[in-house]
Image (cartoon, coloured by chain):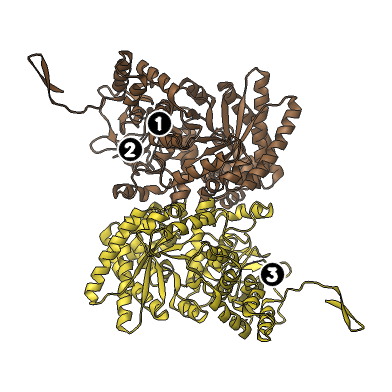
Chain colours: A brown, B yellow
Amino acid sequence: LDFVLDAGRVWLLHGRPLTPAPLAAARIAVALAAAQIVKPAVALLRVDPGALERHLHPRCVPGSATPLAAGMPASPGAAWGLPVFSAAEALERSRRDPVILIRTETDAADVAAMQHCAGILTTSGGMTSHAAVVARTLGLPCVVGAALHLHAAAGTIAIAGRSALGRRDWLTLDGTSGRVYVGRLPLEPPVLSPDLRTLLSWADGYRKLEVHANADTPADARAARARGAQGIGLCRTEHMFFDRARLPLVRQMMLAADAAERRRALAKLLPHQRGDFAAMFAAMPGLPVTIRLLDPPLHEFLPTSPSDQAELAQRLGLPAAEVAARVERLREANPMLGHRGCRLCITWPEILRMQVRAILEAACHCRRQGIEPRPRILVPLVMDAAELALIRRWTEETAAEVFAAAGDRVPWQFGSMIETPRAALLAGELARHVDFFSFGTNDLTQMALGISRDDAGSFLPTYVSRGILAADPFVSLDAPGVGQLLAHACAAARSVGRHIDLCLCGEHGGDAASIRLCHQLRMDAVSCSVPRLPLARLAAAQAALTNNRQP
Amino acid sequence: LDFVLDAGRVWLLHGRPLTPAPLAAARIAVALAAAQIVKPAVALLRVDPGALERHLHPRCVPGSATPLAAGMPASPGAAWGLPVFSAAEALERSRRDPVILIRTETDAADVAAMQHCAGILTTSGGMTSHAAVVARTLGLPCVVGAALHLHAAAGTIAIAGRSALGRRDWLTLDGTSGRVYVGRLPLEPPVLSPDLRTLLSWADGYRKLEVHANADTPADARAARARGAQGIGLCRTEHMFFDRARLPLVRQMMLAADAAERRRALAKLLPHQRGDFAAMFAAMPGLPVTIRLLDPPLHEFLPTSPSDQAELAQRLGLPAAEVAARVERLREANPMLGHRGCRLCITWPEILRMQVRAILEAACHCRRQGIEPRPRILVPLVMDAAELALIRRWTEETAAEVFAAAGDRVPWQFGSMIETPRAALLAGELARHVDFFSFGTNDLTQMALGISRDDAGSFLPTYVSRGILAADPFVSLDAPGVGQLLAHACAAARSVGRHIDLCLCGEHGGDAASIRLCHQLRMDAVSCSVPRLPLARLAAAQAALTNNRQP
């Protein structure tokens, strides 16, 4: 403000709006509330949840380091590691050291390896490229389209006027700024400032939406508790399958020639999964843990390189050509719309039975330890009520066996993902078979718009730049289209005469505008990645303070 | 009927229902109407349109021939040809002789070659396998899952107890019965019996739906006229692109490094396309010809074999490795949801401009010849009104140029495919930019159910056998799910205050139950493959006689 003091009067001459950085905004807001100048409900509105994002991930402290190169900041956070140049190399070398996967672009065959990387760096692609999207989902720092010369065959990267860097040169990746540094720069863990903590505690008093976390490991679950999660909204069991000790068993299960061979592999997987789930329940005592049954296309797990196929052939006692032929048979033209989700349960019920057994045996085990488990079983990619009826029956049969053997009964809930447009349209019928719905808005967006997230990089940027789409629909919910499906499904679920719990668990659960829509649709909860929990708590409170819920 | 005559009285003892074969049913129905025992409107209901199917395709006359093998009758009709064992071989040898493509299974890379085959034979897969679905779409006879030993490397097929057959042995394929014969069996063209023609002429007086044809060539268009088509509901321009003379130009266009190079290839394609369209208009004087702009994923056109890539490299004057790299860059994880449809127009407007120019120049040319053309331009894979606004503007600009040069103006219509769920949900907004909607229910089914037609073979049979789905949703419209989207879009289109022409053009346009649904939804037309036109005319009349249309 420019002002003049003149004979006891204040003349305001000019003012310019100032947007303080989010931590400063929090400090000002809390101070104003403490001085009783504004009420907490007003103070809460002073911080932009989206701007918080950069403070919710580990940060890189560059000091005097100058960046080697810069690209687009595709997924926030920072990490360091040694360069690897292929998925196979990532899997191999990540056993010893943290690694940064460097590729021109990534694709579906890299996903298994990406789980084991500290960060992802590409020389091509944009904010909606495969690498960017997968990294955000995994919570990994990612820089895409970096101005670097990549020589994958030689195992080097280079920029003009500098000698090339190779496999032994540490790199630090800053996915928040899009910069790449040579060496191991110091990293700061994300710390919520005391003011922010105060604001969030106020937010918890105002919001109507519960905030849950998408968490696949006990470590994630514990971190989620520390950041205020009221449960696990989405535990993706397939992420457990990528574990090195299990992947060979998973592959054995998928390439089995018959149900008996498949059951043998599943029997070996059972104790691993039971251990996973017990640890998840222990990290969330008394709180809901929503476990999604195996979802992704099978071939994401399969060995594609000849050496991996040879290794698997040896393990299975099969000729390498036979393994290659079985892998080829599982190849799909459009895996996103293929043999995945509950279709795997329907065609291979033994997978369902193993997973249900693992979940409920883990729950019984926890009870014996004095931990109160609240398992929720979530069926993916549903399109028809008959799928749910059949899977519920098989689940109940397995539950009866487990409880009879344990001499105990643990309450469990059964739910359906709503991620095909047909599931949203027929939500009223689906609701008759379930206790809860979980809106998988990543897939729902893909199918409603007919856009594969993995392939959108070739046209989505043109769409956004030409103003055809206001924003990337995978970042912020498409209210006019996908929003209609959600509204229809919520209304249908509320019309069945008993409470169906409604939760959104797509990446949108960590986006403020999408959270506002969930609030307006009277959902019960959103579930988001662990780092974004504070953002979601604040956004949910702001939605409650400024928006009406639908009647 | 069992009966007894007793003292001037007739005692009916017993009756068994008899379903006459369709041609017999037609004869009985026409005779009953001629004798004034039933009215024509009742006679029309006596023939099952679905049962007509087998009489609408060329038929094989086995005589005393015994089949070599049998499989599933995946696409009706009969044909003979010489065996080929790969897509490349099919393309090569079909220049001289009719060929039968024999594969374990087909996949997307085979589609270009399948266009040039007389029939398709696979040793694996079921009624929803890739081969079956593509063959039905192309109207080719197809037998899948045939009990044959295929040695593709050796170029032979064999059955036990018989010497192997090779590349010089003629085969006859009967896709109606699922049988395979050795040699060239006589084929009978489909002929509509006089009774059936009478019934169909009555049907035309009762039905409310117009019946159009899906036809991609002038020969198809003429055949469609002969079978009563009232226009072309869907002309797929990409099928013109698979022509041998043009495929190299199409590939050049797609692999162009920049817009200038792309325009050079397009300029060479223009006269071909203009000729195509002029011939279509000439075959349908005074009737609407609906031309869909380029739709499929680009890589369907691309060379995948090293020899094809080498040939293209030579033509383009590029290193083979560069061509391979460009092909690789166009590869997609889920091509069905990728860079296709109007997304190609948006990113590469020069393709749109070439196609619009070819359509309207052809129309002006026809007018000079005294032929009245009625071009309708159809935009595929729309998901947002902004796409239509932009494409309409570009189309109008090109039209103004063409008409100024020709010194004439031809009326044209502009329409949108409704094939993404979002397009159906936002049909009210889309309708503001168009004269007509065309419901692409193949893609709409894929996206609403989240099922890739190419990959459904691994689970859809289990779904149908377990009763989860009553029928293959790609054969008969999914009324509870997809039907809701159609109903919503039809209602929205009717609420904009002027007439939006509504037509269904998916494979469902030739299915009696789906046609009934179109009638109930008050659509204006269905469009089906040429052979099925009589089926559609009859089914539309039956729908009008037995069903109410929505108010």
Residue at screen point 64% across, 22% down: A366
Q: Are marks 3 and 2 on the same chain?
A: no
Q: Nearer the viewer, mark 3 or mark 2?
A: 3
Residue under label 3, please give it.
B69
Residue A356: image quadrant is top right
Q: Is residue B508 at least partly visible in the picture?
A: no
Q: Amino acid at mark 1?
A: Ala
Secondary structure at numbered mark 3: strand
Q: Amino acid at mark 3?
A: Ala
Viewer-nearest residue: B464 or A124: B464
Tell which subunit mark 3 falls on. B
Viewer-nearest residue: A37 or A192: A37
Q: Nearer the viewer, mark 1 or mark 3?
A: 1
Residue under label 2, please give it.
A157
- Indicate left or right for B82 with A2 as reference: right
Marking on residue A543? 1
From the top left corner, tell me how far across and down residue A455 is, in percent. Answer: 41, 49
